[in-house]
Amino acid sequence: MEYLKWMEQHFELFFVFCFLWVLAWGAFFAWRRHGAGPTHPPFSGSDVRFSEKYVSGSSDKNLFTRVGGARNALVVTVLKDALLVEPVGIFKWLMPPGFNDLEHYVPRSNILRVETASTPSRNRVRIEIRGRDGATRILMLAVRGHEELLSALRS
């Protein structure tokens, strides 16, 4: 219990250390993302068929990605030739690239199936894709405009 007493006596020092630790990891991940370059080719506003911010979602890659997912932290954009799923601004820079398997640029040819998957709490869109590694993935996205997303993906 000596360490608890020490932490109480030096709380400010402990707090500053924790703050700097989080700041350092955030800077490291931002540096890695910046060094990796863009995850998708550039597009213009005329290419966008559907876009929604603050979407929730999960991937079926493993148990961590199924349970973890993202809550109101994704941007889903349907382009004329692809689907783009990426984290909202601040999460894009603070999390490691590919975290939770919810960062995808999927050409239309790699979208295998799109369907509604209703749950008691909300409507979800189930999108089966072929990833860059060739493996099949299922993305479950809870978008407010799920009908618009379905029609944009099917058109």
Image (tube, rainbow, N blue to C red):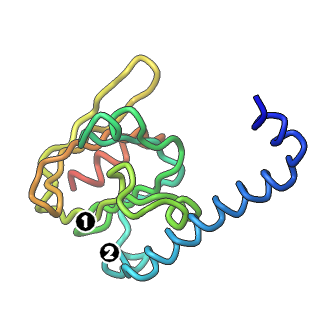
Furthest residue in direction front, as rendered: 2
Location of residue 23 by image quarter: bottom right
The quadrant of the image that shows the N terminus is top right
Please tell me which residue lies in front, 50 or 113.
113
Please tell me which residue lies in front, 137 or 1.
1
Residue 57 percent location from the top left of the image: 40, 42
Badge 1 density bin: few <14, some 14–19, many ≥20, Cα 10 Å? many
Q: Relative to 22, is 50 on the left or the right?
A: left
Badge 2 density bin: few <14, some 14–19, many ≥20, Cα 10 Å? few
Q: Relative to 17, is 102 on the left or the right?
A: left
Q: CA distance from mark 1 to mark 2?
A: 10 Å
Please tell me which residue lies in front, 68 or 155.
68
Residue occupying the point 90% across, 43% down: 9
Residue occupying the point 52% across, 71% down: 28
Badge number at residue 40: 2
- Which is in the foreground here, disc 1 or disc 2? 2
Tag 1 and tag 2, C-beta contact below 8 Å: yes
Q: Is residue 97 above or below residue 8?
A: below
Badge number at residue 16: none
Residue 13 percent location from the top left of the image: 83, 56
Give the residue number, with chain letter if any, for mark 1.
82
Residue 58 percent location from the top left of the image: 36, 40
Q: Is residue 150 above or below residue 1?
A: below
Query: What amino acid does circle 2 point to?
Result: His
Kind of element beneath mark 2 = loop
Mark 1 and mark 2 lie on one chain; the one further toward the N terminus is 2
Residue occupying the point 39% across, 60% down: 77
Query: What amino acid does circle 1 point to?
Result: Ala
Q: Is residue 50 above or below residue 11?
A: below
Q: Relative to 57, is 10 on the left or the right?
A: right
Residue 47 percent location from the top left of the image: 34, 74
